[in-house]
Amino acid sequence: MGALQDEPLFSPALRQPRSLREAWELKSACAEQAVYVSGGTLLRTQWEAGTAAVPQVLIDLRNIAGMEDVTRDDDYLTIGSLVTLTACRRSGALASAGPAAAEAARQIAAPAVRNLATLGGNIASGYGDILPALLVHDAELAVYDGNLLRVQPVEAWLERRWSGAIPPAELVAGVRLPLDQGSGGSRLAVFRKVGRREAFTASLVTIAVTADWDAAARTLRRVRLAAGGGSGRPQRLAAAEALLEGAELSRSLLGAVYEAVEHGFASYDDPFAGEQYKKKTAGNLIVSELWQTLELKARS
Ligand SMILES: Cc1cc2nc3c(=O)[nH]c(=O)nc-3n(C[C@H](O)[C@H](O)[C@H](O)COP(=O)(O)OP(=O)(O)OC[C@H]3O[C@@H](n4cnc5c(N)ncnc54)[C@H](O)[C@@H]3O)c2cc1C
Protein backbone atom coordinates (compact mmCIF):
# COMPACT_ATOMS: atom_id res chain seq x y z
CA MET A 1 0.00 0.00 0.00
CA GLY A 2 1.48 3.33 -1.01
CA ALA A 3 1.79 6.25 1.40
CA LEU A 4 -0.08 9.43 0.62
CA GLN A 5 2.24 12.35 0.07
CA ASP A 6 2.27 15.59 -1.81
CA GLU A 7 5.95 15.63 -2.70
CA PRO A 8 8.32 12.82 -3.69
CA LEU A 9 10.74 11.76 -0.94
CA PHE A 10 14.34 12.66 -1.50
CA SER A 11 17.48 11.77 0.44
CA PRO A 12 20.10 14.42 0.98
CA ALA A 13 23.61 13.61 -0.24
CA LEU A 14 25.82 12.57 2.67
CA ARG A 15 29.37 13.85 2.95
CA GLN A 16 31.70 12.58 5.68
CA PRO A 17 34.79 14.81 5.99
CA ARG A 18 37.76 13.60 8.02
CA SER A 19 39.09 16.97 9.12
CA LEU A 20 37.78 20.36 10.22
CA ARG A 21 39.36 21.88 7.12
CA GLU A 22 37.57 19.44 4.81
CA ALA A 23 34.23 20.07 6.56
CA TRP A 24 34.70 23.82 6.35
CA GLU A 25 35.56 23.62 2.61
CA LEU A 26 32.47 21.51 1.89
CA LYS A 27 30.20 23.90 3.74
CA SER A 28 31.80 26.94 2.10
CA ALA A 29 31.34 25.39 -1.35
CA CYS A 30 27.70 24.34 -0.81
CA ALA A 31 26.60 27.38 1.26
CA GLU A 32 22.97 27.12 2.40
CA GLN A 33 22.42 23.87 0.48
CA ALA A 34 24.49 22.02 3.09
CA VAL A 35 24.09 21.60 6.83
CA TYR A 36 26.51 20.29 9.44
CA VAL A 37 25.11 17.37 11.39
CA SER A 38 26.47 15.83 14.59
CA GLY A 39 23.84 13.77 16.45
CA GLY A 40 21.04 15.09 14.22
CA THR A 41 18.57 15.20 17.12
CA LEU A 42 17.81 18.92 17.00
CA LEU A 43 17.84 19.02 13.21
CA ARG A 44 15.33 16.20 13.11
CA THR A 45 12.88 18.10 15.31
CA GLN A 46 13.28 21.17 13.08
CA TRP A 47 12.65 19.18 9.91
CA GLU A 48 9.62 17.49 11.46
CA ALA A 49 8.21 20.79 12.72
CA GLY A 50 8.82 22.43 9.34
CA THR A 51 10.96 25.16 10.91
CA ALA A 52 13.95 24.15 8.75
CA ALA A 53 14.07 22.54 5.32
CA VAL A 54 15.82 19.22 4.78
CA PRO A 55 19.02 20.31 3.00
CA GLN A 56 20.48 19.00 -0.25
CA VAL A 57 23.68 17.95 1.51
CA LEU A 58 24.36 16.68 5.03
CA ILE A 59 27.93 17.20 6.26
CA ASP A 60 28.31 14.51 8.90
CA LEU A 61 30.99 15.64 11.37
CA ARG A 62 31.34 12.35 13.22
CA ASN A 63 34.43 11.11 11.35
CA ILE A 64 36.56 14.09 12.31
CA ALA A 65 39.39 12.89 14.50
CA GLY A 66 39.86 14.37 17.96
CA MET A 67 36.35 15.77 18.42
CA GLU A 68 35.31 12.89 20.68
CA ASP A 69 38.15 13.36 23.13
CA VAL A 70 38.05 14.52 26.75
CA THR A 71 41.48 15.69 27.90
CA ARG A 72 42.87 17.43 30.94
CA ASP A 73 46.03 19.42 31.54
CA ASP A 74 47.12 21.58 34.47
CA ASP A 75 44.79 24.42 33.57
CA TYR A 76 41.80 23.11 31.60
CA LEU A 77 39.40 20.27 31.00
CA THR A 78 38.81 20.12 27.24
CA ILE A 79 35.79 18.33 25.79
CA GLY A 80 35.40 17.71 22.05
CA SER A 81 32.23 18.77 20.27
CA LEU A 82 31.27 15.21 19.37
CA VAL A 83 31.19 14.00 22.97
CA THR A 84 27.61 12.90 23.56
CA LEU A 85 25.40 14.23 26.33
CA THR A 86 25.35 10.71 27.79
CA ALA A 87 29.16 10.81 28.03
CA CYS A 88 29.00 14.31 29.56
CA ARG A 89 26.51 13.06 32.10
CA ARG A 90 28.78 10.18 33.06
CA SER A 91 32.05 12.10 33.04
CA GLY A 92 33.68 12.32 36.45
CA ALA A 93 36.06 14.92 35.04
CA LEU A 94 33.16 17.17 34.02
CA ALA A 95 31.38 16.61 37.34
CA SER A 96 34.51 17.89 39.04
CA ALA A 97 35.48 20.77 36.70
CA GLY A 98 31.98 21.85 35.73
CA PRO A 99 29.32 20.45 38.06
CA ALA A 100 26.58 22.78 36.82
CA ALA A 101 27.32 21.70 33.22
CA ALA A 102 27.25 18.01 34.21
CA GLU A 103 23.89 18.59 35.88
CA ALA A 104 22.58 20.37 32.77
CA ALA A 105 23.60 17.39 30.62
CA ARG A 106 21.76 15.13 33.07
CA GLN A 107 18.56 17.10 32.55
CA ILE A 108 18.53 17.39 28.76
CA ALA A 109 16.04 15.19 26.85
CA ALA A 110 15.86 11.43 27.54
CA PRO A 111 18.45 8.62 27.30
CA ALA A 112 17.80 7.66 23.66
CA VAL A 113 18.26 11.27 22.57
CA ARG A 114 21.28 11.88 24.82
CA ASN A 115 23.03 8.83 23.34
CA LEU A 116 23.07 10.60 19.95
CA ALA A 117 22.99 14.26 20.92
CA THR A 118 26.36 15.99 21.17
CA LEU A 119 27.75 18.78 23.27
CA GLY A 120 28.70 20.67 20.07
CA GLY A 121 25.19 20.41 18.65
CA ASN A 122 23.68 21.68 21.89
CA ILE A 123 26.04 24.67 21.87
CA ALA A 124 25.86 25.41 18.13
CA SER A 125 22.07 25.78 18.35
CA GLY A 126 22.75 28.98 20.30
CA TYR A 127 20.16 28.15 22.97
CA GLY A 128 20.90 24.62 24.23
CA ASP A 129 20.30 24.07 27.93
CA ILE A 130 23.99 23.51 28.62
CA LEU A 131 24.89 27.09 27.70
CA PRO A 132 23.87 28.88 30.95
CA ALA A 133 25.96 26.32 32.85
CA LEU A 134 28.97 26.91 30.57
CA LEU A 135 28.58 30.66 31.14
CA VAL A 136 28.85 30.36 34.92
CA HIS A 137 31.89 28.08 34.63
CA ASP A 138 33.73 30.73 32.53
CA ALA A 139 34.00 28.13 29.77
CA GLU A 140 35.59 28.90 26.42
CA LEU A 141 34.84 27.51 22.97
CA ALA A 142 37.38 26.41 20.38
CA VAL A 143 35.98 27.43 17.00
CA TYR A 144 37.44 26.70 13.57
CA ASP A 145 37.23 29.51 11.00
CA GLY A 146 38.80 27.77 7.99
CA ASN A 147 42.36 28.69 8.97
CA LEU A 148 42.78 28.51 12.71
CA LEU A 149 41.25 27.15 15.86
CA ARG A 150 40.41 30.21 17.95
CA VAL A 151 39.45 30.15 21.61
CA GLN A 152 36.86 32.59 22.88
CA PRO A 153 34.67 32.90 25.98
CA VAL A 154 31.20 31.39 25.62
CA GLU A 155 29.74 34.83 26.37
CA ALA A 156 31.63 36.42 23.45
CA TRP A 157 30.64 33.56 21.15
CA LEU A 158 26.96 33.98 22.16
CA GLU A 159 27.19 37.68 21.37
CA ARG A 160 28.44 36.82 17.87
CA ARG A 161 25.89 34.02 17.47
CA TRP A 162 22.89 36.15 18.43
CA SER A 163 23.99 39.16 16.38
CA GLY A 164 24.34 36.99 13.27
CA ALA A 165 28.11 37.57 13.10
CA ILE A 166 29.17 33.93 12.86
CA PRO A 167 30.06 32.85 9.32
CA PRO A 168 27.91 29.88 8.25
CA ALA A 169 30.92 27.54 7.80
CA GLU A 170 32.44 28.19 11.25
CA LEU A 171 32.63 25.04 13.36
CA VAL A 172 32.47 24.49 17.10
CA ALA A 173 35.36 22.11 17.77
CA GLY A 174 35.26 21.86 21.55
CA VAL A 175 34.82 23.45 24.95
CA ARG A 176 37.34 24.06 27.67
CA LEU A 177 36.67 24.69 31.33
CA PRO A 178 39.22 26.26 33.67
CA LEU A 179 40.30 23.98 36.49
CA ASP A 180 40.93 26.64 39.11
CA GLN A 181 37.33 26.72 40.22
CA GLY A 182 37.75 24.67 43.38
CA SER A 183 35.43 21.80 44.20
CA GLY A 184 35.37 21.90 47.99
CA GLY A 185 32.40 22.65 50.21
CA SER A 186 32.86 26.39 49.79
CA ARG A 187 32.15 26.39 46.07
CA LEU A 188 28.52 26.62 44.93
CA ALA A 189 27.58 25.19 41.55
CA VAL A 190 23.91 24.92 40.66
CA PHE A 191 21.88 24.23 37.53
CA ARG A 192 18.06 24.20 37.58
CA LYS A 193 15.57 23.69 34.80
CA VAL A 194 11.82 24.31 34.77
CA GLY A 195 9.76 22.82 31.97
CA ARG A 196 6.14 22.02 31.35
CA ARG A 197 6.37 18.82 33.34
CA GLU A 198 8.72 17.28 35.91
CA ALA A 199 11.10 15.40 33.57
CA PHE A 200 11.81 14.61 29.89
CA THR A 201 10.65 18.07 28.93
CA ALA A 202 11.89 21.01 26.94
CA SER A 203 12.91 23.88 29.17
CA LEU A 204 10.91 27.03 29.79
CA VAL A 205 13.54 28.51 32.12
CA THR A 206 17.03 27.40 33.10
CA ILE A 207 19.32 29.03 35.63
CA ALA A 208 22.90 28.39 36.67
CA VAL A 209 24.95 29.75 39.57
CA THR A 210 28.57 29.47 40.67
CA ALA A 211 30.22 31.32 43.57
CA ASP A 212 32.71 30.94 46.40
CA TRP A 213 31.06 31.04 49.83
CA ASP A 214 32.89 32.54 52.80
CA ALA A 215 30.89 31.12 55.73
CA ALA A 216 32.60 33.28 58.38
CA ALA A 217 31.81 36.54 56.59
CA ARG A 218 28.57 35.24 55.01
CA THR A 219 29.70 36.59 51.66
CA LEU A 220 29.93 35.33 48.11
CA ARG A 221 32.84 35.95 45.76
CA ARG A 222 33.42 35.20 42.06
CA VAL A 223 29.65 35.19 41.61
CA ARG A 224 28.33 34.05 38.23
CA LEU A 225 24.61 33.94 37.47
CA ALA A 226 23.07 32.97 34.14
CA ALA A 227 19.64 32.16 32.75
CA GLY A 228 18.15 30.84 29.54
CA GLY A 229 15.52 28.34 28.48
CA GLY A 230 13.43 27.36 25.45
CA SER A 231 14.89 28.96 22.36
CA GLY A 232 15.81 32.14 24.22
CA ARG A 233 19.26 33.66 24.47
CA PRO A 234 21.36 32.31 27.35
CA GLN A 235 22.75 35.28 29.27
CA ARG A 236 24.76 36.38 32.29
CA LEU A 237 22.82 38.44 34.84
CA ALA A 238 25.40 41.14 35.51
CA ALA A 239 23.36 43.46 37.75
CA ALA A 240 22.36 40.65 40.11
CA GLU A 241 25.96 39.37 40.18
CA ALA A 242 27.21 42.84 41.15
CA LEU A 243 24.76 43.04 44.04
CA LEU A 244 25.95 39.71 45.45
CA GLU A 245 29.69 40.13 44.91
CA GLY A 246 31.36 40.57 48.30
CA ALA A 247 28.15 41.70 50.04
CA GLU A 248 26.92 40.14 53.28
CA LEU A 249 24.07 37.78 52.53
CA SER A 250 20.72 38.79 54.00
CA ARG A 251 17.03 38.53 53.26
CA SER A 252 16.93 42.10 52.01
CA LEU A 253 19.90 41.49 49.72
CA LEU A 254 18.20 38.43 48.25
CA GLY A 255 15.07 40.53 47.71
CA ALA A 256 17.14 43.00 45.71
CA VAL A 257 18.76 40.13 43.79
CA TYR A 258 15.31 38.78 42.88
CA GLU A 259 14.33 42.17 41.48
CA ALA A 260 17.59 42.51 39.55
CA VAL A 261 17.07 39.08 37.94
CA GLU A 262 13.43 39.81 37.13
CA HIS A 263 14.40 43.13 35.60
CA GLY A 264 17.59 41.99 33.86
CA PHE A 265 16.60 38.64 32.34
CA ALA A 266 15.49 39.22 28.74
CA SER A 267 13.24 36.36 27.63
CA TYR A 268 10.22 36.03 25.35
CA ASP A 269 6.57 34.96 25.21
CA ASP A 270 5.84 31.49 23.85
CA PRO A 271 2.54 29.57 23.53
CA PHE A 272 3.05 27.98 26.98
CA ALA A 273 4.46 30.79 29.14
CA GLY A 274 4.78 34.53 29.00
CA GLU A 275 8.00 36.48 29.41
CA GLN A 276 6.89 37.80 32.79
CA TYR A 277 6.38 34.27 34.10
CA LYS A 278 9.89 33.33 32.94
CA LYS A 279 11.45 36.38 34.56
CA LYS A 280 9.75 35.64 37.87
CA THR A 281 10.68 31.96 37.64
CA ALA A 282 14.34 32.77 37.02
CA GLY A 283 14.35 35.16 40.01
CA ASN A 284 12.66 32.64 42.29
CA LEU A 285 14.96 29.79 41.23
CA ILE A 286 18.13 31.77 41.77
CA VAL A 287 17.10 33.23 45.12
CA SER A 288 15.73 29.97 46.49
CA GLU A 289 18.86 28.08 45.41
CA LEU A 290 21.12 30.66 47.02
CA TRP A 291 19.10 30.71 50.19
CA GLN A 292 18.76 26.94 50.58
CA THR A 293 22.35 26.20 49.73
CA LEU A 294 23.74 28.88 51.99
CA GLU A 295 21.49 27.95 54.89
CA LEU A 296 22.65 24.34 54.61
CA LYS A 297 26.29 25.36 54.36
CA ALA A 298 25.96 27.73 57.30
CA ARG A 299 24.71 24.86 59.46
CA SER A 300 27.36 22.33 58.41
C1 LIG B 1 12.87 14.51 22.30
C2 LIG B 1 13.90 15.61 22.34
C3 LIG B 1 14.09 16.30 23.52
C4 LIG B 1 15.05 17.33 23.60
N1 LIG B 1 15.22 17.96 24.79
C5 LIG B 1 16.16 18.93 24.88
C6 LIG B 1 16.38 19.59 26.14
O1 LIG B 1 15.76 19.29 27.16
N2 LIG B 1 17.34 20.57 26.18
C7 LIG B 1 18.08 20.92 25.07
O2 LIG B 1 18.94 21.80 25.17
N3 LIG B 1 17.88 20.32 23.89
C8 LIG B 1 16.96 19.33 23.77
N4 LIG B 1 16.75 18.70 22.56
C9 LIG B 1 17.47 19.18 21.36
C10 LIG B 1 18.77 18.39 21.01
O3 LIG B 1 18.62 17.03 21.28
C11 LIG B 1 19.99 18.87 21.77
O4 LIG B 1 20.10 20.28 21.70
C12 LIG B 1 21.28 18.22 21.26
O5 LIG B 1 22.35 18.47 22.14
C13 LIG B 1 21.68 18.68 19.86
O6 LIG B 1 22.87 17.98 19.53
P1 LIG B 1 23.02 17.20 18.15
O7 LIG B 1 24.39 16.66 18.10
O8 LIG B 1 21.92 16.23 17.95
O9 LIG B 1 22.85 18.44 17.16
P2 LIG B 1 22.43 18.40 15.62
O10 LIG B 1 20.96 18.21 15.49
O11 LIG B 1 23.32 17.51 14.81
O12 LIG B 1 22.82 19.92 15.22
C14 LIG B 1 22.20 21.02 15.86
C15 LIG B 1 22.63 22.32 15.14
O13 LIG B 1 24.00 22.57 15.35
C16 LIG B 1 24.74 22.53 14.12
N5 LIG B 1 25.97 21.83 14.47
C17 LIG B 1 26.08 20.59 15.00
N6 LIG B 1 27.35 20.33 15.36
C18 LIG B 1 28.06 21.45 15.04
C19 LIG B 1 29.44 21.83 15.18
N7 LIG B 1 30.35 21.00 15.74
N8 LIG B 1 29.83 23.06 14.74
C20 LIG B 1 28.93 23.91 14.21
N9 LIG B 1 27.61 23.63 14.04
C21 LIG B 1 27.19 22.40 14.46
C22 LIG B 1 23.84 21.84 13.12
O14 LIG B 1 24.06 22.27 11.80
C23 LIG B 1 22.47 22.26 13.63
O15 LIG B 1 22.16 23.56 13.18
C24 LIG B 1 15.81 17.67 22.45
C25 LIG B 1 15.63 16.95 21.25
C26 LIG B 1 14.68 15.95 21.19
C27 LIG B 1 14.51 15.19 19.90
Image: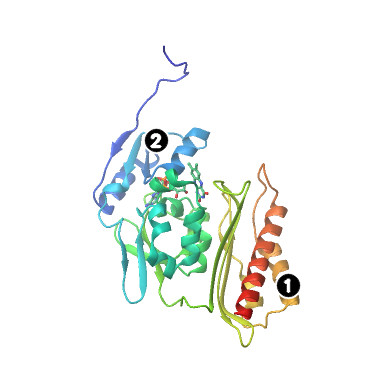
Q: Where residue 290 sits: x, y (%)?
A: 64, 71
The quadrant of the rendering that contains the N terminus is top left
Mark 2: amino acid: Pro
Looking at this view, is 245 or 158 the one in front?
245
Q: Which mark is residue 289?
A: none
**What is the residue that sits farthest to the bottom in this orientation?**
216
Mark 1: amino acid: Ala
Residue 161 appears in the figure: no
Q: Where residue 265 sits: x, y (%)?
A: 65, 61
Q: Residue at x 50, y 60 (%)?
A: 103
Looking at this view, is 67 or 84 the one in front?
84
Q: Residue at x 36, y 50 (%)?
A: 169
Number of numbered labels in the structure image? 2
Say which element carries label 2.
loop
Residue 98 appears in the figure: yes
Q: Which mark is residue 55?
A: 2
Residue 68 placement: quadrant:
bottom left
Looking at this view, is 54 or 162 the one in front?
54
Q: Which residue is mark 1?
A: 256
The residue carrying mark 1 has its beta carbon less than 8 Å from ligand 1 = no
The residue carrying mark 2 has its beta carbon less than 8 Å from ligand 1 = no
Residue 144 placement: quadrant:
bottom left
Q: Is residue 169 left or right of residue 47?
A: left
Looking at this view, is 95 or 241 the one in front?
95
